[in-house]
């Protein structure tokens, strides 16, 4: 029998990996120029929210999204250690089974207080929060109208659900309205927007966009991942800053940026929101966050409620860096600083990678972003500031950029 | 119906022109990605132009089913009801 099987002719073997060949080739070409792999950096030691040891060199961190510098806050760390001692290393269970500890309820309460909203639901990552909420609330026959520059987690949430997906041009209110107007009468509508778009660091005209969405009877979801903690009078984000948070049905956020750990969430005032805990698969079929993580998040969120001074300092740094890089001759993603992200536009991937490496040699880490993650096929060096960057570090950074820009032939 | 299709096809053909950088001759079997070399940004602008011209929505779900010009014309005829 075995013999007979082995003698059978079988079809030629199709390598499932051949679809990745163009990317493999692109990477090989880039690395063959001798440039350090921009996607293979290892931090050997993290000294503070703004400094780490990379390749044995002390490096200023300017690409971490650690906006409020909470990763090394002594209260935050103490809370995490205590929770490790009291509750162990992990929950080994889903939130709806054995994975809800006192700490998970506490962090959801902290979020309700932070946003002044009735309901909060914590996911294991921010990615899962978008994936879960979007795919669950917009179903067959419903329409999702979203900005074309939306984050991958939003797109994946759309792809996982059964709704009709209708994108519109970035921040284009008229394009959004046209699409809302054309949706068949009676269909459910969800408009998905972001407060800060992380690639260029620009913000959305949420007030106008949400007013239009409401005019057409749409529910509104806003991802405030890159604004929590420092935009808006209470750090609730761009919607708060523009005075339209009350009209947002769902705010999506993350613990992996300003909060300084990992996890994601959705807050809402929808009266039926709690049913999400039973129907949202990325929430149900995942182990919950470790007790130490939710404990650090709770402490961090509560401290962020009163972090007005840190917020002011971060804005000051953002303005200084934006002006310094503009004056040095770099082309930036926004004309004015709109967030803690400052994107420096590179002429192409090759020179972008050269510049990235020159900065690393100067002792500065930034994010290299390239297509398809970027809008308009741009190569970007993305800088995200931290409230713990000193005024002196910001000046150092401007000097490093200027020198590296000359080395890489961009200035 | 055939008149509708011919008229729709003519209007779409006019809309393709500014995006057809290489001046490739467009027939029903012409593929957007492989023949006209549309990238994702071009697709977005082109779809928006068609949506505005016919006052319709071509969702991403529907776009996934459309590979060539003939399929697009058929879809637009159908969407106009």
Image (cartoon, coloured by chain):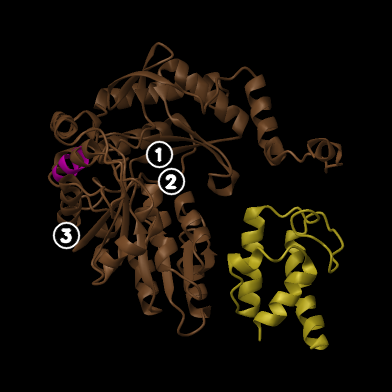
Q: Are marks 3 and 2 on the same chain?
A: yes
Are the residues at dot 1 and dot 3 in contact (C-beta closer than 8 Å)?
A: no
Q: Which chain is brown?
A: A
Q: Residue at x 40, y 58 (%)?
A: A281
Which residue bears the numbered disc 1?
A342
Residue B24, located in which quarter of the rendered image?
Answer: bottom right
Residue A6, located in which quarter of the rendered image?
Answer: top right
Are the residues at dot 2 and dot 1 in contact (C-beta closer than 8 Å)?
A: yes
How many numbered tags mark residues here? 3
Colour of chain B, in one word, is yellow
Which residue bears the numbered disc 3?
A116
| Region of the chain picked out in magenta, as a range | A296-302
Q: SS of the residue at dot 3?
A: loop
At label 3, counting other C-alpha atoms closer than 10 Å, the crowd grade (few under 14, some 14-19, many 20 or more) is: some
Percent position of residue A321, x then y:
35, 33
The answer to whether one can see residue A241 in this image is yes
At label 2, counting other C-alpha atoms closer than 10 Å, the crowd grade (few under 14, some 14-19, many 20 or more) is: some
User: Observer-nearest residue: A318 or A363?
Assistant: A363
């Amino acid at each position: 029998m075995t013999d007979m099987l082995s003698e059978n002719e079988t079809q030629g073997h199709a390598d499932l990996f051949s679809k990745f060949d163009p990317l493999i080739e692109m990477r090989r070409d880039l690395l063959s120029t001798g440039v350090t792999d921009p996607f293979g950096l290892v931090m050997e030691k993290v000294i503070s929210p703004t400094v780490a040891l990379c390749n044995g060199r002390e490096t200023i961190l300017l690409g971490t999204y650690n906006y409020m510098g909470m990763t090394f806050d002594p209260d935050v760390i103490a809370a995490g250690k205590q929770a490790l001692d009291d509750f162990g290393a992990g929950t080994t269970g889903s939130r709806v089974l054995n994975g809800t500890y006192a700490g998970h309820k506490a962090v959801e309460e902290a979020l309700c207080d932070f946003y002044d909203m009735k309901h909060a639901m914590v996911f294991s990552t921010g990615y899962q929060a978008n994936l879960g909420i979007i795919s669950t609330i917009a179903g067959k026959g419903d329409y999702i109208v979203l900005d074309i520059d939306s984050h991958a987690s939003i797109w994946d949430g759309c792809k996982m659900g059964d709704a009709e997906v209708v994108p519109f041009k970035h921040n284009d209110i008229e394009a959004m309205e046209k699409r809302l107007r054309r949706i068949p009468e009676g269909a459910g509508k969800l408009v998905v927007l972001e407060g800060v778009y992380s690639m260029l660091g620009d913000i959305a005209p949420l007030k106008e966009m949400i007013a239009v969405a409401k005019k057409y009877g749409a529910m509104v979801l806003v991802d405030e991942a890159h604004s929590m903690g420092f935009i808006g009078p209470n750090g609730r984000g761009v919607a708060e800053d523009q005075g339209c948070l009350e009209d947002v049905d769902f705010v999506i956020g993350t613990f992996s940026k300003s909060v300084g750990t990992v996890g994601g969430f959705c807050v809402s005032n929808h009266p039926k929101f709690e049913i999400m805990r039973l129907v949202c698969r990325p929430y149900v079929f995942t182990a919950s966050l470790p007790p130490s993580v939710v404990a650090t998040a709770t402490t961090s969120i509560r401290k962020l409620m009163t972090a007005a001074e840190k917020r002011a300092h971060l804005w000051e740094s953002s303005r200084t860096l934006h002006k310094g890089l503009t004056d040095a001759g770099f082309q930036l993603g926004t004309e004015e600083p709109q967030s803690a992200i400052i994107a420096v536009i590179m002429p192409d991937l090759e020179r972008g990678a050269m510049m990235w490496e020159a900065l690393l040699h100067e002792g500065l880490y930034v994010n290299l972003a390239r297509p398809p993650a970027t809008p308009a096929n741009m190569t970007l060096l993305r800088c995200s500031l931290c409230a713990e960057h000193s005024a002196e570090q910001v000046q150092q950074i401007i000097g490093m950029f200027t020198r590296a820009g000359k080395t890489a032939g961009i200035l | 119906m055939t008149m509708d299709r011919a008229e729709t096809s003519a209007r779409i053909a006019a809309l393709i022109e500014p995006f057809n950088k290489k001046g490739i001759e467009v027939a029903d079997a012409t593929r957007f990605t492989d023949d006209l070399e549309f990238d994702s940004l071009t697709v977005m602008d082109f779809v928006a132009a068609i949506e505005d011209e016919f006052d319709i929505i071509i969702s991403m779900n529907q776009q996934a089913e459309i590979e060539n010009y003939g399929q697009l014309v058929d879809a637009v005829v159908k969407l106009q009801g």
